[in-house]
Image (spheres, rainbow, N blue to C red):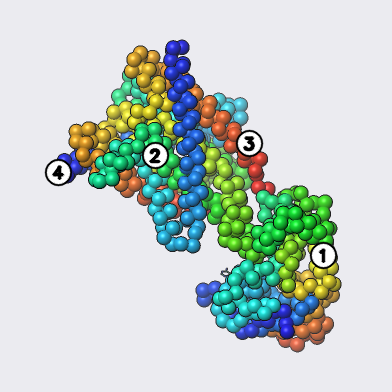
Amino acid sequence: MMSYLHALPSLAHGLGTTFLVSISAMILAVGIGFVLGIVRSQVPRAIDLPILAVIEFFRGIPLLVLMYFIFFGLPQLGFKTGQNAAAIAALCLYAGALGSEIVRGAIVSISGGQTEAASALGLSRVQILALVVIPQALRRMLPPFVGLFALIVESSSLSSLINVTDLLQTAHQNVERDNDIALPVYLTVLVAYFAVNYPISLVSQRLEKRLA
Amino acid sequence: MPMLAMSGVRKAFGTNVVLKDINLAVDPGEVCCIIGPSGSGKSTVLRCINRLVTIDAGDVVIDGLSVIDPAVKDVDLRRRVGMVFQQFNLFPHMTALENVTLAPRKVRGLSADAANALGVTLLEKVGLREKAQSYPAQLSGGQQQRVAIARALAMEPKVMLFDEATSALDPEITGEVLAVMKALASEHTTMICVTHEMGFAREVGTHVVFMDGGLIVEEGPPHAIFDAPQAERTQAFLSKVL
Amino acid sequence: MRDAAPQLAHGFVLTLQIAFFGVIGALAVGVIGAAMRVSTSRAARVAATAFTEFFRNTPPLVQIYFLAFAIPKIPGIGPHLILPSIVAATLGLVLHQGAINIEILRAGLGAVPAGQREAAQALGLSRIDELRSVLVPQAVRISLPALGNNVISLFKNTTLVASIGVLDIFGEANDIIATILVSAELFLTVGVVYVICVALLGALFRALERKFALAR
Ligand SMILES: Nc1ncnc2c1ncn2[C@@H]1O[C@H](COP(=O)(O)OP(=O)(O)OP(=O)(O)O)[C@@H](O)[C@H]1O
Ligand SMILES: [Mg+2]
């Protein structure tokens, strides 16, 4: 039991790393999502198709395989990455692919009638997008982006497998040191993830209802 | 003895008292048409009869069974009452024949063969025998409503309830549904029809009820209601719709 | 690289087996849980809701670790609950993806128009027949796209089983790398196999959606 109490500070530290990885990945994913999403909503289908293929690739490849490729595979090709950077890179590529769908979907859903009304006012295409469509689309994007953050936090647990000392990896290390605390330690980890992700998904659901 | 007797029926949704004190008797073979403005409680009256809503006070007795008697099961009431909805509410994942045979198989316990034979007969009756294998989405609104009537008849009910059966239809196809209803009336089916079709109420109805604000304001034979309405509210309503 | 092929193929078969049992298990959890969430028993509703929220809001990898490493440490009964790694891994996937299925099917039931329930009741159908013949078939059709996404997500998550030593295709790849170092090619190969499978699954579900589309 003492040994479990001693594990708590390191678990807290691990949770900090989980947040660091998740938040970094989220910021990058939002960036990727907006750039690709806006581009995809504006370009003709022929240009959109190759972008879509890349997005489908990052949605189709399991996150863990992507993470291992970046961490273990890329150094062979001359790109060395630290474990945290590799974890963040894999997470933001995966979440960015999902994010671009969110952005594109929201923009397309607003565009129709609004674009016509705005061009009737003589606004340019960029003005229409920046002043009319995107501000309205933001409301639609908010709930799925909040949900995406919950998915990133959940998925960040995979970074423990490339030795990022996140919450799960810290737990693992503590249990390796003293096998008898496996039950309370892993229970703590489950509860900690739940305590983070449950409120996030509640917020996402609330927003969805409110903005519907 | 009337087929249906409502006495002192009261129903509120929260603080909204929708039915205040409804008293109504319908004899076997009668065609009772309920008319009245939107929100007056017409649909709620129908839904009290087969316990789709439970009443707060009063009683509804249908074919000798009381809806407030806890010993009377839902299925006992619903087997005696066929209901046709404004929006048809056909089951979209079933063919016309499957829609019609569902209750005979599941509720009345008929064999598949017997249910199918009954189903085909009923579809024939509403003029849609050749549509037995069609899905609702492949049928026009008028055809869907006729299938819905066949589905309700498949219970071999004592009373048929129609809740604005033609309101969702384009004006030029209401006729085919009204014709089926007229045919049922001529076979002395007991019917209670909420309707906006004043022509139908006058021609086919044996009894017309005017409702407003959760109360029956006036009732009587069609010519009395339509040609010499007594209450001011009836006169005002009829002058708007006729 | 060519030498690795038989080992990867062997792992791929195990991946397919885990995915198969995982999908079946998660669907069973989803159906039972969704039925509990619309049941008249308050206890059943509360239990199913708690299960859903807990297991869909915690990472499947942590659930797998918990089943494999923590459960055996429960005082008294733990030692009798030591699961083979492959069972613990599959069960972890079933819990997480099953919880998501519950939510999907419950939302699907909620999306069936109210008139359908009324019509079923007016015909005198029992609650069971109303669910079985009228509501569930429509809810499943409404839920099909989301269920398909969840199957794909489970399929991708089968890679997690390697983390507790199960030799699926990804585990075999790791095993090969431990002996000979060819990781870039190898992970790319494994990744492409998954991307192809995911694309096939996606096409399969779109075909199912078209076949069972509910035209209203
Ligand atoms: N399930 C319900 N919950 C709450 N209020 C209801 C419910 N059903 C009906 N009401 C309310 O009861 C009142 C009467 O409704 P009802 O549907 O019986 O009227 P109606 O005469 O059939 O009107 P319409 O011609 O528009 O169909 C309305 O104010 C309606 O909002
Ligand atoms: Mg009504």
Q: Quadrant of the N terminus of chain A?
A: top left
Left-right relation of B87 to A55: right
Which residue is nearer to you in this view: A92 or C109? Answer: C109
Q: Nearer the viewer, mark 2 or mark 1?
A: 2
Q: Which numbered tag is attached to residue A2? A: 4
Residue B154 location in percent, x, y? Answer: 74, 63
Q: Chain of mark 4?
A: A
Residue at image location 44% in from the left, 58% down from the top: C45
What type is the residue that disc 4 sits on? Met
What type is the residue that disc 2 sits on? Gly
Label 3, residues with CA under 10 Å away: few <14, some 14-19, many ≥20? few
Which quarter of the figure has residue B229?
A: bottom right
What type is the residue that disc 3 sits on? Ala
Secondary structure type for disc 2:
helix
* Residues beneath discs 4 and 1 located on the same chain: no
Residue A174 location in percent, x, y? Answer: 21, 35
Label 1, residues with CA under 10 Å away: few <14, some 14-19, many ≥20? some
Label 4, residues with CA under 10 Å away: few <14, some 14-19, many ≥20? few
Secondary structure type for disc 1:
helix
Left-right relation of C2 to B187: left
Which quarter of the figure has residue C158?
A: top left
* Residues beneath discs 3 and 2 located on the same chain: yes
- Mark earlier in primary sequence (3, 2): 2
Q: Which residue is mark 1?
A: B180
Q: CA distance from mark 4 to mark 1?
A: 82 Å
* Residues beneath discs 2 and 1 located on the same chain: no
Q: CA distance from mark 3 to mark 2?
A: 29 Å
Q: Which numbered tag is attached to residue C207? A: 3
Secondary structure type for disc 3:
helix
